[in-house]
């Protein structure tokens, strides 16, 4: 597997039996035998992602905790953490780190996956996934009409908030410390950015 500074990277999974790269669909993806690896399909290309590290998982847990508290537990929608399949479109099947589907869109939930755009997607950057999250997946999320995308840097303890306009994301800024997020999907979320990160 390709590496950068010792970290395994997200790479096209060219060795997996199936259609040609660029032609993968949800049905092809769902037919892959369980082999312990994490896969996604972006623009018909099958990618394999390395397993997340402990710091990454800690950040996922904190975002999940606060979103469960202020979204799911008060009946505003559902909160999910990966691995969960999201079929954005015919050739885009992703597994975001954290996502929110608001109450008005719960019809997008199926037994095996979510079909359509979640209202909010959160990706926790790591050295192995940051390029993929900021390019291929960002474009796929924008094209699918995901209204809001938070790009989280756990090392810098920052959150970048992006909103979609005409299939392109516009940044509302980079936030840290005691700032709260200017979310349009969750406009009254009373959580300071520093609460999403470990103090250690």
Image (cartoon, grey):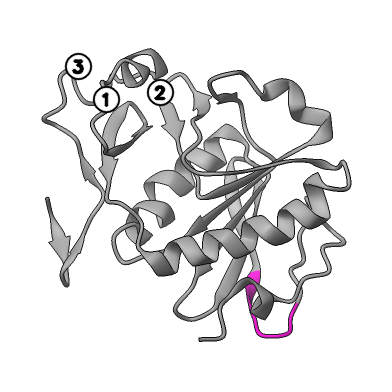
Tell whether label 1 touches label 2 (CB within 8 Å).
yes
10 Å crowding of disc 1: few (<14), some (14-19), many (20+): few
**32, above or below 12, in the image:** above
User: Mark number for residue 122?
Assistant: none
- In terms of image quadrants, where is residue 122? bottom right
Instruction: Compare marks 3 and 2 and give the one earlier in the sequence.
Output: 3
Mark 3 is surrounded, within 10 Å at the Cα level, by few (under 14), some (14 to 19) or many (20 or more) other residues, namely some
Left or right of residue 102, residue 176 in this image: left
Q: Secondary structure at mark 3?
A: loop
Question: Residue 59, position in %: x, y?
Answer: 53, 66
* Left or right side of 38 for 141: right
Task: Kindly report the distance in space between the C-alpha atoms of the residues bearing marks 3 and 1.
Answer: 11 Å
Residue found 62% across the figure and 40% down from its top? 146
Q: Residue at x 53, y 41 (%)?
A: 141
Q: Which residue is mark 3?
A: 18
Residue 2, position as x, y percentages in the image: 13, 54
Q: Residue 104: horizontal and vertical position, in percent?
A: 83, 30
Q: Secondary structure at mark 1?
A: loop
Residue 91 image label: 2
Mark linked to residue 22:
1
Which residues are the magenta region? 173-179
Closer mark to the observer between disc 3 and disc 2: 3
């Amino acid at each position: 597997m390709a590496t950068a500074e010792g970290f395994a990277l997200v790479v096209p999974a060219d060795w997996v039996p199936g259609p040609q790269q660029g032609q993968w669909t949800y049905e092809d993806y769902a037919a892959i035998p369980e082999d312990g690896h994490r896969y996604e399909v972006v623009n018909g290309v099958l990618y394999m992602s390395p397993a997340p590290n402990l710091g990454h998982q800690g950040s996922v847990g904190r975002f999940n905790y606060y979103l469960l508290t202020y979204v799911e537990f008060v009946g505003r929608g559902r909160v999910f953490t990966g691995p969960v399949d999201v079929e954005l479109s015919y050739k885009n099947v992703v597994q975001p780190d954290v996502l929110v589907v608001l109450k008005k869109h719960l019809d997008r939930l199926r037994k095996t996956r979510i079909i359509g755009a979640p209202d909010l997607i959160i990706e926790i950057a790591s050295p192995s996934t940051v390029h993929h999250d900021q390019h291929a997946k960002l474009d796929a999320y924008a094209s699918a009409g995901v209204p809001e995308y938070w790009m989280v840097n756990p090392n810098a303890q920052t959150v970048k908030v992006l909103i979609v306009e005409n299939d392109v994301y516009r940044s509302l800024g980079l936030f840290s410390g005691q700032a709260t997020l200017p979310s349009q999907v969750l406009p009254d979320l009373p959580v300071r950015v520093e609460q999403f990160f470990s103090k250690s």
